[in-house]
Amino acid sequence: MKLWKKVYLYALVLTTLCINLGFLGMMYAAYEHMLSAEKERCEAEYVILWNNIFSDIQRLEKALPLDAEYFARYVNAYSSYYGSDTMLIGIMGDTVLTEYEGLGELPLQDGIYLCEEAQTTIYVSQDLGKGYEGYRIVMRRTLQDFDAMWERLRPLYLGGGMLLSLGVSCLLAAIVRSVLKPMDQLEWAAKQVQEQKWSVRVSMQGKDELAQLGAQFNAMAETVEKSVEKLKQQSQQKQEFINNLSHEMNTPITSIQGFAEYMQITDISREEQEECLNFISSESRRLKEISTTLLQMVDMQCEERIQMEEFSLLELCEKIELFYQKQYVPKNIKFHMYCGKIHMKGNPVLFESLLRNLISNAGRAVYGKSDAWIELRVSQTEEAIQIQVSDNGCGIAKEHLEQIFEPFYRVDKARSRAHGGSGLGLAFCRKIAEMHQGTITVESELEIGTTFIVTIPFPADEL
Ligand code: ADP
């Protein structure tokens, strides 16, 4: 059974019970009130009659002493004034002197009595007192009109109670339905999520618990949607990575195999042999480079294994400068390094790899230029350390700038392969920057040059 129906049923039973009990109570109170008004009226009339009879008897006492017959006549005379519903009965001792058809026991004690016979009947009884011992006047009144009126009023009360219950029940149904309506929306939305429709949201107004539940549901659906989206992206990236990797590994392996077989089956000269071996050696180097970078990247997945320590960037840059000066001076490439006494917290080995990757890429970009230069510049602001590697090489076209950080993405595939490189260099650099909570960006213009900017913020507790 639906929740709103359940709530409605419980509320309906309760309200119907309360309303009908209330009406019954009201009915009873009204009955009691009307009856006591009738009793008072009856008593008041009786007192007047009794006084009249008593004063008549006293007045005529001397001329006509009181006896049973005379008393009966008196009482009958007064009784005849009334209609059929009221009767005065004269009693002497326990003998009824006047006409009376014995309807129940007559009260022989002073007082007012109510008797629920076939009709509601009131008896008022009082003796004549001192000097007239034994004489008693009883007034008997049947409440025919009262009973008839009550007969008419009772169904009105009962009908009113039922009608009110019906009205309240309709109102209750509408209120319960509208208050719990958002539950339908929530149920529908939960089903959608079950069917993997993550974009579903509910719209609930107000600040009550249901609206809060709706807001929480939306927040949960959003988190799930984002996680699913992220998982999809990650799985797609992984698939792309595997495709690229198998392609990148396959190319040098096929070349190595090709050259080796060529050397096996063909009678070639010493120079040709040397040439083939050079190819085999350079392709094997590339394979090694790919596998080394891959291993480093896998290692970086376990962040807890990576030691972070305070190190001098100046010392690291001087070491790198020494290495590249040796390499570039013979090739006529100018290498400049600018770095102050800057310290940073990080992993010096990985950071050296990052700088070497960027500088090696710059070396390839300026290859063949007559006035080639590469610059490594480290600066520091209040919030971060900035490392720039610039060159005046071939530059990168705008449409490639976004993708060059993806694994195995190359702007000029043939040229890049000819110059070596794993195709993972920039992806690796970005990973290292991210591990240091930093970023890596690039600015470049074709035939003018390129600048890679690595920004490593200082940890929040050091600011
Ligand atoms: P690779 O091992 O091929 O160098 P990277 O991921 O390091 O792979 O670089 C991706 C591509 O970005 C390179 O193939 C190259 O085309 C381009 N690139 C990187 N650095 C530079 C640069 N300084 N100047 C021009 N192109 C660059």
Image: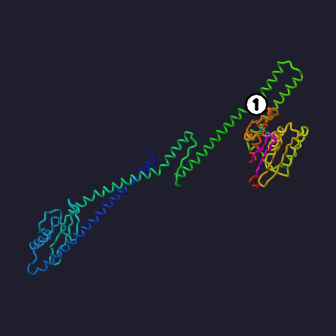
Pinpoint residue 127: horizontal percent, then vertical percent: 18, 73
Q: Quadrant of the C terminus?
A: bottom right
In the rendered view, tell whether residue 196 sits above or below residue 213: above
Q: In the image, what residue occupies the spot 20% across and 59% down?
A: 118
Nearer-the-camera pick, 41 or 458: 458
Pinpoint residue 130: horizontal percent, then vertical percent: 17, 78
Counting other residues with Cα less than 10 Å from the Cα at mark 1, is it few (<14), some (14-19), or many (20 or more)? some
Query: For residue 450: magenta?
Result: yes
In the rendered view, tell whether residue 123 sits above or below residue 302: below
Disc 1 Cβ-to-ligand 1 distance below 8 Å? no
Judging by the rendered image, the residue that carries numbered circle 1 is: 249
Give residue 247's quadrant in the image: top right
Q: Quadrant of the N terminus?
A: top left
- Where disc 1 sits, the SS reads helix
Judge left or right: residue 195 versus residue 100: right
Quadrant assignment for ligand 1: top right
Give residue 104's quadrant in the image: bottom left
Name the dominant secondary structure of the magenta segment.
strand
Nearer-the-camera pick, 378 or 28: 378
Query: For residue 101: magenta?
Result: no
Judge left or right: residue 73 versus residue 356: left
Judge left or right: residue 318 versus residue 151: right
Pinpoint residue 188: horizontal percent, then vertical percent: 51, 43
Pinpoint residue 305: horizontal percent, then vertical percent: 76, 43
Q: In the image, what residue occupies the spot 50% across and 46% down?
A: 185
Judge left or right: residue 76 versus residue 174: left
Please state the extent of the stretch shown in magenta in the rendering.
Answer: 438-457
Q: Residue furthest front?
A: 447
Amino acid type, label 1: Met
Give residue 430's quadrant in the image: top right
In the rendered view, tell whether residue 70 sits above or below residue 241: below
Q: In the image, what residue occupies the spot 82% across and 18% down?
A: 265
